[in-house]
Image (tube, helix red, strand yellow):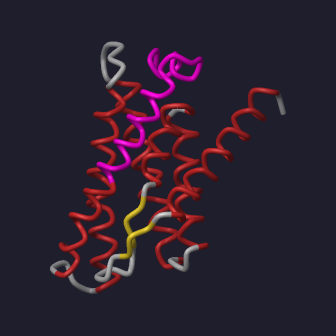
Amino acid sequence: MNDKKIKNMVYTSLLAALVCVATFSIKVPSVVTNGYVHLGDGFIFIAVILLGRKNGAWAGSIGAALADVLGGYSHYAIPTFIIKGIMALIMGYVINKMPGDNKFKWIFGAILGSIWQIIGYYVVGSVMVGSFISTIMDIPGNIIQSVAGIIVAVIFVAAFKNTPIGKRIITN
């Protein structure tokens, strides 16, 4: 294994741990679907910005699913793994395919990925509860979670804009 692969594995693992901690540490429970709202999405967005689409998706999927297992929400671990991974892939795809070198195109990708996440959790929660009506109440919480995640990522990008990490973000 070469040094680049090892570095990518270490960075992906580190970001997965950060996603897990951010997801696990501050959570607001949802009574309808037995899920919760958290700040981990911000670190998934940061993972995609720093690591790219593929490794960002791995970090987000693993970290969020691990937080579900550790937090007693293991019934959500597999759906979370899939939903968060696709959310990160959507964001990374937009970053890679959106024309130009707009330093804020990642925000558009995060918004599109968040829309997927909101729909994904609505469908999964509805199937788990057995009602597509009662789970509508969880949509505002998922919107708040997504907006908070984007704000966390914006703050991160702003805080590091004059560092080597920030220069990489701005040029991607």
Q: Is residue 155 magenta?
A: yes
Q: Could you tell me how many numbered marks the image carries?
A: 0
Residue 115 position in % (x across, y down)? 26, 51
**Residues rendered magenta in the picture:** 146-172
Residue 163 position in % (x across, y down)? 56, 18
Q: Residue furthest right?
A: 1
User: Residue at image x 51%, y 21%?
Assistant: 166
Nearest the viewer among 102 and 129 is: 102
User: Residue at image x 33%, y 46%?
Assistant: 113
Quarter of the figure that contains the N terminus: top right
Q: Residue furthest bottom?
A: 130
Q: Residue furthest front?
A: 159
Q: Is residue 5 above or below residue 36?
A: above
Q: Is residue 37 above or below residue 113?
A: below
User: Residue at image x 57%, y 58%?
Assistant: 20
Left or right, 56 with reference to 107? right
Tell me the quarter of the picture where residue 39 sits.
bottom left
Q: Is residue 23 magenta?
A: no
Nearest the viewer among 57 and 161 is: 161
Q: Is residue 104 above or below residue 37?
A: above
Left or right, 90 with reference to 11? left
Left or right, 106 with reference to 134? right
Left or right, 7 with reference to 137? right
User: Residue at image x 32%, y 17%?
Assistant: 102
Residue 64 position in % (x across, y down)? 52, 60
- Dominant secondary-structure state across the stretch colored magenta: helix
Q: Residue furthest left?
A: 133
Residue 116 position in % (x across, y down)? 30, 52
